[in-house]
Amino acid sequence: MRANQKAWLAVAPVVLVVAFTAVAPLMTVVNYSVQDIFDVHTRLFVGLDWYRETLRDPRFLEALVRQLGFSALVLALEIPLGIWIARCMPLQGRMTVAFLIILAVPLLIPWNVVGVTWQIFARPDIGLLGAAVTALGVSYNYTSSAFDAWATLVLMDVWHWTSLVALLCFAGLAAIPPAYYQAAALDGASRWQVFRHVELPHLKSVLTIAVLLRLMDSLMIYTEPFVLTGGGPGASTTFLSQYLTSMAVGQFDLGPAAAFSVLYFLLILLLCWLFHASVMKRGDAAA
Amino acid sequence: MAAIRASSLHHRYQPGAPPVLEGVDLELRDGEAHAVLGGSGAGKTTLLHLLAGLLRPSAGTIEFDGRDLTAASPAERQVAQVFQFPVLYPALDVAGNLGFPLVNRGWNAAAVRRRVGEVAELLSIAALLTRKPKQLSLFERQLTAIGRALVRPDVALVLLDEPLTAVEPAAKWRLRQALKTVQGELGLTMIYVTHDQTEALTFAERITLLHHGKALQTGSPEALYEQPAHEAVARFIGSPGMNLVDGEVSAGSIRCNGQVLGATAAADGRCALGFRPEWAAVGERGVPVAVRSVRALGTLGGVATGLVTAELGGQAIHVQQRLDGPVGSQARLHIDPSRILLYRNGWLVTDATG
């Protein structure tokens, strides 16, 4: 018993830190989500009412569908593109360093700045991209067309984050011993087979990380669409985080916003867990 | 199978870089088990890459059965290689790995399955065919990699690049036996590259000793042991290697430190005298030496044998002999005079029989 008490003492710092950084804030949100709060002294326990309300809110559901669509789209573009870029890079030499620096640049730019940059870049009147596209005779305006707004957002996200996938994949490719390529050459493997049987299996762990990072991040995207489109035109680019912010900060609906937050958090957790579990399960089957 | 002839291979990785291979000649008979022995940096792996077609030599030619394939791609040469560590395709099971080179050459599924079954049977890995590489021990993985190298019935040459390096010591012997058996049964032309002389001596019919990018000697294990063509070969082969001491030839006698050790027909002049540790004995006859240490090696036929380290004219030598009686610190060294080898400028003096 005494030994157990000592053990508790030893883990106490960690318990305290976790309690203050994760458990307490989270529990505050959970606490809000089951109450209707009028002022500091007047509150009402409402059970799961806010959850029910949120799940029935058509604007929440629309934002959710948009969010899932956006994440699926950017992942479907960034992962293959990142792998392709990594494969095109020279594995060593002076050019490699140049490539790595160029690739790292988008990752170093603050998200706000990325949004502002693209906001100007894509303007049909003075932006390089927008004006060029317009000059080609294509009607393009991200502030009035939902399709254009989506295209611009997706393009911006691909520009911003493909580098991350490419850098991770490059590290993965650089770690493959040359003997694998030599064996494949002796076995008469085609380029596709080298990719399928040598590179892809060795990239599995970095790709898992890349997909997880991009999945989490894209589900949480806020700053860039906020700066670029402000969620518009209409609500066509309003994603979950933006809707949540307008609810919590704009309208000060703390109860529904708390329920929304918990659902949002659980959604990200669930999707990441599902992905990770499916990768691990297949790994075990193959192991 | 094929007979292989590599002539005066030169290779440097970049223009201006130091040469890795300098005029290496190599000849393999059809179906020969050949070992390339050398220390690290001798150019062994480069030589393999040149033979496999993974590299193009800076100069020199490579012929398979008389056809010049110097510029041919690895696939055209029908060459297979086993690497230092087991190189398998992680996503494919053992059967998939074994069949990979056949599938790539357009074999139909039934023929692939039949051939994979044969090879698996030969290496006793038939029970593992449905396993993935991750589920195999290192030994089984390397066995699978060997299987993949043997799977093509028309393979011209199998290259083995220190294939036992990654395998646990207990399994090394089994793997070497498996290789040797398969080589004999299929009559494969094999090149076994290693820095381990025991592996080379037990595997190969003939050995080429590579040293600093040059092939110093090619011959049977006995020839390399009994008549090393170069001082480097003499030192590399044997454990401990051959004794090499400074000496000279004058008026038909071999002298060291002023003492006559034997007679020779070689011309007069300074040279190095080489003798294996077991070609000499420390005892009551011969030239005086200072004994430094005596280490027991064990018993052979009921007689204790040991390694005597002594100094002959200030140069350390090793003698391996029976320890019948005590060895004093001041003793005499007798070297079998018919077995003393003379080296000049590093190379064996061949007209020295006497």
Image (cartoon, helix red, strand yellow):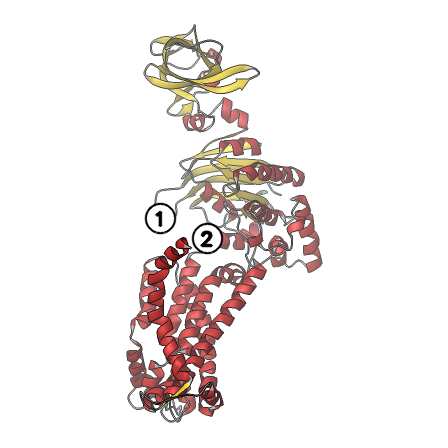
**In this rendering, is residue A44 above or below B112?**
below
Q: Nearer the viewer, mark 2 or mark 1?
A: 2
Percent x, y for residue B109? 68, 59
> Which residue type does callout 1 highlight?
Pro
Chain identity of mark 1? B
Please name whichever residue, B292 or A29, is drawn nearer the observer in this view of the structure.
Answer: A29
Q: Nearer the viewer, residue A254 or A126?
A: A254
**Residue pushed farthest front?**
A1
Q: Relative to residue B322, is residue A39 depicted above or below? A: below
Tell me the crowding category of disc 1: few under 14, some 14 to 19, or many 20 or more residues within 10 angstroms, Cα based. few
Q: Dot 2: what SS?
A: helix
Q: Estimate the x, y position of residue A283 in percent, counting from the top left.
A: 54, 61
* Residue closest to the eye, B230 or B15: B230
Residue A238 in view (yes/no): no
**Residue B278 location, x and y as percent?**
48, 17
Disc assigned to residue B15:
1
* Nearest to the observer: residue A61 or residue A20: A20
Looking at the rendered structure, the number of numbered marks drawn on it comes to: 2
For the N terminus of chain B, give its image quadrant.
top right
The numbered mark 2 sits on a residue in which chain? A
Can residue B165 be seen by looking at this rendering? yes
Q: Amino acid at mark 2?
A: Pro
Residue under the image location 43 percent in, 38 percent down: B23
- State whether residue B173 is above or below residue B297: below
- Taking the spot 39% from the left edge, 45% from the top edge, the residue there is B12
- Tell me the residue that label 2 is attached to: A178
Q: Is residue B261 above or below residue A271?
A: above
Q: Where residue B197 appears, x then y in whole percent?
A: 49, 32
* Circle on res. A151: none
Asked whether, in this view, residue B83 is left or right of residue A256, the answer is right
Q: Secondary structure at mark 1?
A: loop
